[in-house]
Amino acid sequence: MSADRPSPRAAARSFPLRWERREPPLPAAAVLAVGGAVPGLAAATLERIRDGARLCVLADDGPSLPAADRALLVLGAEADLPWADGARYLGRDAGLLVPTTARPEPAAALWRRAVGAAEGQLCVLVPGRALIADPPTPLTSPDALDAFLRPEGPGRHGAEDGDR
């Protein structure tokens, strides 16, 4: 390796993620539930859709993902977003969805690149979690939320489900 080129290790920098209180809060653009809060957000989202709200939904879920790590993200107009115990409202900051009352340090624009979000992808950054996904389309069938109404999540069936 030549002396004028930095090694890959030297080129990589790491920055600790810190959160500062944000005043005033960002307008809400999404709501995120993780773990045990997912069924409550799914139920509230279902109710809002039945009332005519136009919402988009993303899930971080799978058969091998522990129930405590499941996540449900609901995007929409601030007035249409559901409320659920344990869920967190998110707002837009430099292409990131972050908690409405918190600001990531260093700047949000740096974190979007650092977590590897490509142009056009949705990027969520909250304490302890980063999610990157293609933007969802509006939910057209409330049935898509049925699996998230169960605490154990989609693809997981309790004993009572086996009796049906």
Image: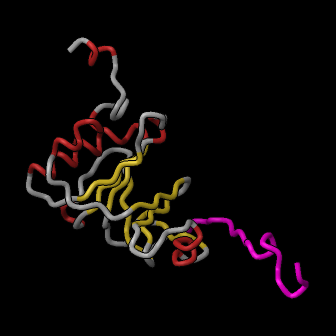
Q: Residue furthest left?
A: 51
In which quadrant of the rendered view does residue 25 lie?
Answer: bottom left
**Magenta-span inclusion, residue 58:** no
Q: Residue furthest right?
A: 3
Placement of 81 over or under 144, stated as above or below: below
- Please tell me how many numbered marks the rendered image carries: 0
Placement of 97 over or under 155, stated as above or below: below
| Whole-percent x, y for residue 133 in the image | 41, 60
| Whole-percent x, y for residue 109 in the image | 52, 78
Q: Residue furthest top?
A: 163
Judging from the image, the colouring scheme is: secondary structure
Closer to the camera, 65 or 44? Answer: 65
Residue at point 41%, 48% (across, down): 60
In which quadrant of the rendered view does residue 4 lie?
Answer: bottom right
54 displayed left or right of 26:
left
105 displayed left or right of 62:
right
Which quadrant is home to the N terminus?
bottom right
Which contiguous range is marked in magenta? 1-20
| Whole-percent x, y for residue 12 in the image | 73, 72
Which quadrant is home to the C terminus?
top left
Residue at point 48%, 41% (across, down): 69
Judge whether residue 132 can be spotted in this image: yes
| Whole-percent x, y for residue 38 in the image | 35, 42
In which quadrant of the rendered view does residue 149 lie?
Answer: top left
Which is the main secondary structure of the residues drawn in magenta? loop
Residue at point 33%, 53% (across, down): 58
Residue at point 89%, 83% (across, down): 2
Placement of 30 over or under 155, stated as above or below: below
**Magenta-span inclusion, residue 10:** yes
